[in-house]
Amino acid sequence: MKKINTFLLISLVLISVLMTSCKKNDDPSQAKITESKIQEVLDSIIANTHVPGLVAGIWAPNEGIDFVYAAGVSNIETNAPMDADMIFRIASNTKTFTITVLLQLVDEGLISLDDPLSDYLADFPRANEVTIKMLTNMRSGIFGFDEIDGFWEGLFSNPTKFWTTDELISLARDKPYYFNPGTGYHYSNTNTIIVGKIIEMLTGKTLEMNINTRILNSLNLYNTTYLVGGTSIPGFHSSAYYGGDYDPSFPELSEYLDTSWAGAAGCMTSNIADLKKYVEALTGGEFLQPATQQERLVCPEIDGGFGYGEGILGYKGFYGHNGECPGYRSLMINSPERKCTIIVWYNGELDSANPIVLAKLIPELIYPDF
């Protein structure tokens, strides 16, 4: 009941904001009015949910919008404010990096998306039925290792355990497929963990080194890190709270779990300035050949107008990803056509407060035709 009421409170605020902001106005002050409406939405999240704090960056230069905002607290105990420069765990946004490297290997002729998984993991059950493309777009049907009964209890009972890639894959090896490969969609972290292993097999280099040399170094993303293991977040960061439900007794989570449990599917950290630069390069085709990029951005619908392609989320011309891990939730999207970038993150993981809804709401505030 609390979750439903929370959504109702937010919805009332958002509806009010949208009703007063959708009229086209050519006055230069319209950008400031729009930014004020966006801030109202963000403030409503802090006021009406248990999200401790958030950081948002919205850039739409054609509309005159250059908006960076931090709200709430970075630490519940000290009431220290959130800061827009803070680094956070980007969780599944990591998948866009991993799949980008794989697609570069496709462009280099080292692998084909039509190759069967059996070419690389011959002993994985039904590997001859799964293609590499199915791993990238979540159509393989392979079971998610973190959906196994008892996984999270085990993780929290031994939070500093280092997980190898092979261990994570082995957890899913003997579990049933969700569906016959290629016949459905199910978001499974195991898919991307396998992709990470294949990248290392093909290149003879670690995934960390591939991401560093192919993406981070080329874009000078100095605040973005692929974390192979350990609990530390490098640099200035917030505290982080909750594991889905609002539970004040839950431990503070920013540096609680060894990041190896997420691996190629979610181990990275960054900040909004780096992610702005990265997601604009990601959607702008800077990493891939044009045909590969075009294919990647085909995102068949999965739910509520959202689609999922090859390691990328799509919604009405915006592309990127979202992220969720204990203590953090985030959204990173860009529209190449509109030249608009939206990045938001919370220092709380709550099922009742998902920043992905802002992929719909913020563009509606900016664009009357959205």
Image: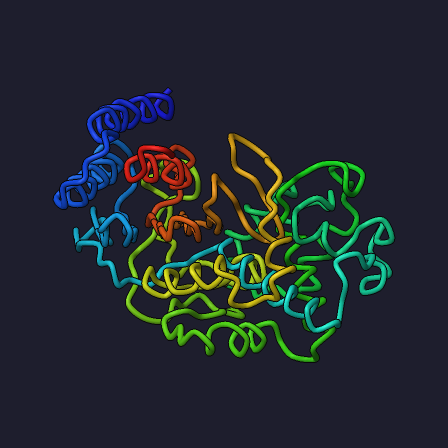
Query: Farthest front residue?
Result: 26
Camera-side residue: 53 or 358? 358
Q: Residue at x 40, y 68 (%)?
A: 232
Q: Position of residue 3 (x, y in %)?
A: 37, 26
Image quarter of residue 42 = top left
Image label count: 0
Q: Position of residue 208 (x, y in %)?
A: 56, 73
Q: Residue at x 28, y 62 (%)?
A: 86
Camera-side residue: 27 or 288? 27
Q: Residue at x 73, y 42 (%)?
A: 141
The N terminus - image quarter: top left
Image quarter of residue 109 = bottom right
Does residue 27 appear to the left or right of 325 in the view shown? left
Q: Position of residue 100 (x, y in %)?
A: 58, 63
Q: Is residue 57 visible?
A: no
Q: Height in image: 315 above or below 76?
A: above
Does residue 152 appear to the left or right of 21 in the view shown? right
Q: Colour scheme used in the picture?
A: rainbow
The C terminus - image quarter: top left
Camera-side residue: 335 or 249? 335
Does residue 1 appear to the left or right of 317 in the view shown? left
Q: Is residue 170 visible?
A: yes
Camera-side residue: 233 or 274? 274
